[in-house]
Image (tube, grey):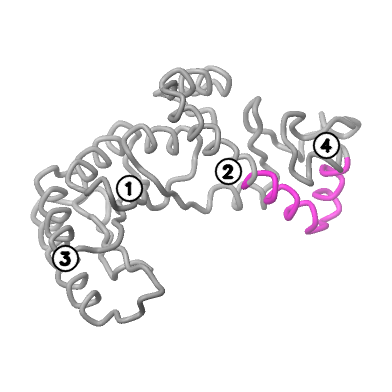
Amino acid sequence: MMSFDECPMFPASHEYVKNSIERTIRWAKRGKEAHHNDSQALFGIVQGGIYPDLRKRCAEELVKMDFPGYSIGGVSVGENKDEMKKMIDYSIEYLPLDKPRYLMGVGSVDGILEGIERGVDMFDCVLPTRLARHGAALTTNGRVNIKAASHEFDFTPLDSSCCCPCCKKYSRAYLRHLFHVGEDTGKKLLTIHNITFLINLVNNARAAIKEGRFKEFKEDVYRSYKIDDSHPGF
């Protein structure tokens, strides 16, 4: 469960964000004092915009309250990729290593890998399901628009390296047909695939970390998916 917080607009002045984090800190304290459900973990949310001093203050005050986990909020709200990386860095430095760190609202391939590289443990995002509803699939060869005419007679799997029910049982041609006739099953199948794809990505990242080759793994993913700092692959 997430503490009540204010996610400030982007961009916002230092003065505005300072007042905002003080409100977030007060709400976090009140929420933690009122929370008595031992079976549910309540996380504090680090805010502070693009300002390192405010991120530091918010994180340190939340850590004093000893939450079971901590969220990094206020990212993916309009800032560019470099700013997002800095905001993660400004926040995570002050969060304990023995508590889960959760990056809110980030679910792209590069966003997940950049977060993992910086010490993030958990992610959530509407991206995979929203893309699926619009006919976009995440694959090992990049994003695929299944509604494109090029898939009309393509009887190959959506992603030959994926073992999800969508890829094991149905062809690109059939998936395209479902979207063109307005059958919601197509959206459900792409949703299953996109979520499976990201779960597999994180599983592979975990294995790479254990084997001491995360940097190489990330570089391989970026090359395969044509991701760079100016144009994400997804």
Q: Residue at x 69, y 44 (%)?
A: 193
Quickly name the residue at label 2: 199
Q: Quadrant of the N terminus?
A: bottom left
N-terminal-most mark, 3 or 2: 3
Gap in Å between the C-alphas at discs 4 and 3? 51 Å
Quickly name the residue at label 1: 75
Name the mark nearer the viewer: 4 or 2.
2
Name the mark nearer the viewer: 2 or 1.
2
Q: Kindly check if marks 4 and 3 are in contact, taking CB atoms under 8 A apart as contact.
A: no
> In the picture provided, is 187 more to the left or to the right than 214?
right
Gap in Å between the C-alphas at discs 3 and 1? 23 Å
Name the mark nearer the viewer: 4 or 3.
3
Quickly name the residue at label 4: 172
Magenta segment main secondary structure? helix
Residue 177 in magenta stretch: yes
Residue 65 got which mark?
A: 3
N-terminal-most mark, 4 or 3: 3
Q: Which residues are magenta?
A: 174-195
Q: Secondary structure at mark 3?
A: loop
